[in-house]
Amino acid sequence: MSRRRLPFSLTLAAGLTLAGGLAATAVLTVAVSRLEYDNKALAFEQGTGVRVAALRQGMDDAVEVLNVTNQLFTTVQPVTRAQFHDFTTPLLQRNPYIRAFNFHRVVDAADRAAFEADLRQFQPDLVVREMRGRARVAAPARERYHVVDYLEPMQGNEAALGLDVSQNHQVMDALGRAQASGRAALTSLLQIAQAPGAPSFEVLMPVYARGGRLLGDTAAVVSVPTLANATLARAGLLDDHSIQLKFYAGGRADPAHLAYASRAVTSSEAPVPLMSGGYTGRALNTFTVGGQSWTVEAIAAPSPWLADHLGSTLLLTGGVLSTLLLCAFVQAAGERARKVQELVRERTADLKLTNQRLIDDVLARKRTEKALQESEQRFRQLVAMSSDWYWEQDEEFRFTHVTGDFTEKSGIATERVLGRRRWDYVPALTDTELGRDHVATLEAHEPFRNLEYRVVDDNGEERWFCINGQPTFDETGRFTGYRGTGSDITARKVTEQRVHHVAQHDVLTGLPNRSLLQDRLGQAVAYATRSGHQVWVMLIDLDRFKYVNDSMGHKAGDVLLMTVAARLRSSLRDTDTVARLSGDEFVVILSEHHDQPLTPDIVQRVMDSVAQPVMLGTKEFFVTCSIGVAAFPSDGTPSENLIEHADIAMYRAKKLGRNNFQFYTPAMNEESLERVRIESALRNALERNEFVLHYQPQVDLQTGRIVGMEALIRWKHPELGMVPPSRFIGIAEDTGLIVPIGAWVMRTACAQNKAWHDAGLGKLRVAVNLSARQFGAADLLPGIEAVLGDTGLDPSCLELELTESLFMSDVTPAVELLHRMKSLGVNLSIDDFGTGYSSFSYLSRFPIDVLKIDRSFVNDITHDANDAAIVASIIALAHNLRLSVIAEGVETAEQLDYLRHQGCDEMQGYYFSKPLPAHEFEQLLRQRRGLTAPEDEPQTAAA
Ligand SMILES: Nc1nc2c(ncn2[C@@H]2O[C@H](COP(=O)(O)O[C@H]3[C@@H](O)[C@H](n4cnc5c(=O)[nH]c(N)nc54)O[C@@H]3COP(=O)(O)O)[C@@H](O)[C@H]2O)c(=O)[nH]1
């Protein structure tokens, strides 16, 4: 069998079987189909012949009946009406297709009247008539008439009585033919007056008198459909519709002369279209009766295709199915053969491959054995060279072998190990989760990697080992123990511990850093939650540390921090945590124990320990701190906010003058939030141009004239509204924002003053507040110089207001700085004088020009003798030192009066005017308003 394949995986043999089978089926089907057609044609031909013969017989029978009737007139002369009736009545009953028998009598013109009179016994007024169109009219006078005289049956045929047919060509033509042939003759199809629409013909035979004279003729009116149905019924074919018959008068199938048509198969009886297409035969037969030709058209009724081709269809179906089955069988047989061949081929290839592999395996095994020997040798050499050792254990995890240099590498004698389990000589292993996991791993016979544990070696020194192990099994799969390697990782561990310590501790002080602090805080909170005890978090911030750092150098700052760290540590219990958060900020975690309750004394103790004098170089230095305390859970602080709340409390402590401690309260949080809000808005205020300056006049008490003004900043915030300086100056100082803001104030105030000078409004002096941060800024002097240079303001018209606190820490550098400022030509004044240290000694060393008496003293001079005395003393002191004095916060005439009497030089206060926007202040100048002279009091010009 060929192995070639046809498309769609059909084998060639199956393809040939399919093609041959289908071809044979086709040939046989065509042959059988042809036979079926021939049978059908023969049956049609026979059926047609039977039907034509039956019809012809019917016609002949009709002629014969007429011949019988005509015999009556030949035999009996004259025949009476009654005789005619008696003779024809049984004939009519036997032959229902005969509609009527007639006797056409020949009537001469002379006999017409008598004839008509005779007829009137049947119908009154009857005359000889003829057909004109569809109407019957009296026949006109003619030589001879051919009138219907006897008529049977009369009933239903009355219309024909007395009818002259001499003008009817068909009747007269048939009569002529009958006379000529001596045999009955047929008319063609007639329309009968009494039955219009029913195709009929007449068969006629002449009647002669004994002398040979024509008396008339006998006629039978025959209904063709009745005749045809009767004859077909007689032949048993009336209900057989396999052939439709059409019966025409004449020699051809002319529809105009159709006399009869048998019933055709209706549409409901027709075969369904899919099955239609059977035999379609048609045949024409012509015969002559009574001298008249008749044509019969036979049409085979449509029949289902399947009925006509049942045999061939079955043959085709059977042939195709058999072919397909045979084809499938051949295909399956072919497939099976092919698979067997493929299998044989694959098996052969597999065998070859297996064989090759066996050969390769043998070679590989030899190579492996050799490599193993080499590897073993290398391994021994490597182990000897490396810092690792190799070990083996039995199925009970007892050491059975360690490499020779184990003791040298591990510091442990082999006797301490062999025959024992690992945890026998490292008992701590079973006390830890790591050790317990390890034992579980061994019992599960699973490999393990990088197990690190601590060992004490034979010299009592702590070492760290790292081991890896692999379970071993014999050839039956039984567990036989473990083997693996070990190494001494002590050096790495020490380094790791160092790194870990560094990562969690502050390098300078050695205290825990922020990261470790968080761990400890978590533990403390967990303990407090479990035990129901308190945890206090203290945030400690050194007061004025920045000053030490800036003025004495970072080394001094570091010494201070280390000293404070040591003091904090020693003032607390070992169980408390002291951590350095950042810079000069420390955090202490105090955990309460049932025998050691937490009290504010502990906080005070911490403060006291910090406040001890510190030697920085050769100088003794006093440092204080501010402490905020947050308590968990008593003050409601969530654990994650403890440091934050301690910070808020610490800030409050700072605000309250430093060197004190505060416990956190929720109200502080509000302040803190407000502070955060202000702080974030403040950062953008300058660039958004939200600041303006107001100017408050300073008035000479002798002349009553405005001699200067203090520039006071105002912040117009789009949402917060007008924010007073008391709400943001402190924050600006803390955040350092005061430096750029202060620079803006100085530049704006100088520019404005110069503009008023240029406008001819007097050579006024403008006072600008200088904050601590500005005072400490490195670019203070160049900044002032630049402003004066840029605005062109005379330096003597600028006054810088400083507070005493700026010089309190270390006077010497402050004096130097003031001298350098003074050398620029500006005026210097001490603001809020009397509220700070007010050390008279430094006043003599400072190059200042003005003392500004704080408004808290001025406020009470009229009803507090002390304040009045202080104010008088300040004025006297200033004058002694050749300083000018200005009193601020003057609100009443009484205050003004007292100040004047004490010789105060100038005043500033609501009594004369509140701080005013620039344009309003300018109006004041233009109006040249001033205080009235002392003798003219009360004054006139409060704003
Ligand atoms: N570093 C800077 N500090 C500034 C600047 N502008 C203002 N400030 C400081 O803010 C504090 C509050 O100032 P302010 O609300 O403007 O109050 C000043 C006057 O309005 C007020 N004053 C003046 N006369 C009277 C009075 O008769 N009665 C009364 N109750 N208050 C009065 O005193 C404030 C001026 O004080 P002082 O500076 O001490 O002369 C305040 O400390 C400002 O210093 C700035 O630009 N930079």
Image (tube, rainbow, N blue to C red):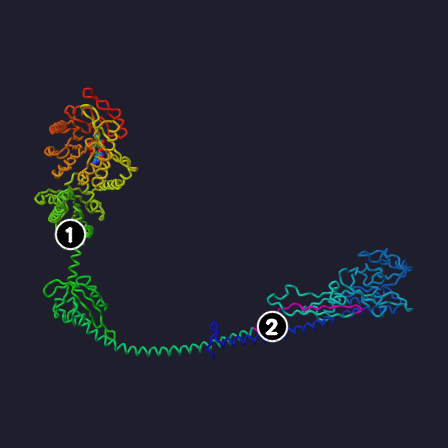
- Say above or below: 121 vs 315: above
Residue designated by label 1:
507
Judge by depth and name the residue closer to the eye, 210 or 706.
706
**Residue shown at 61%/75% (left/top)?**
31
Determine the CA span between mark 2 and mark 1. 113 Å
- In the rendered view of the protein, which quadrant contains the C terminus? top left
Residue stretch in magenta? 289-316
- Work out whether residue 874 or residue 601 is closer to the camera in this orientation and state it: 874
Give me the disc on residue 310: 2
- On the image, which quarter does residue 499 sit in? bottom left
Q: Nearer the viewer, mark 2 or mark 1?
A: 1
Q: Is residue 240 visible?
A: no
811 within the magenta span: no
Query: Which comes sooner in the sequence, label 2 or label 1?
Result: 2
Where residue 115 sits, quadrant-wise, is bottom right
Element assignment for label 2: helix
Count of labels in the image: 2
Q: Secondary structure at mark 1?
A: loop
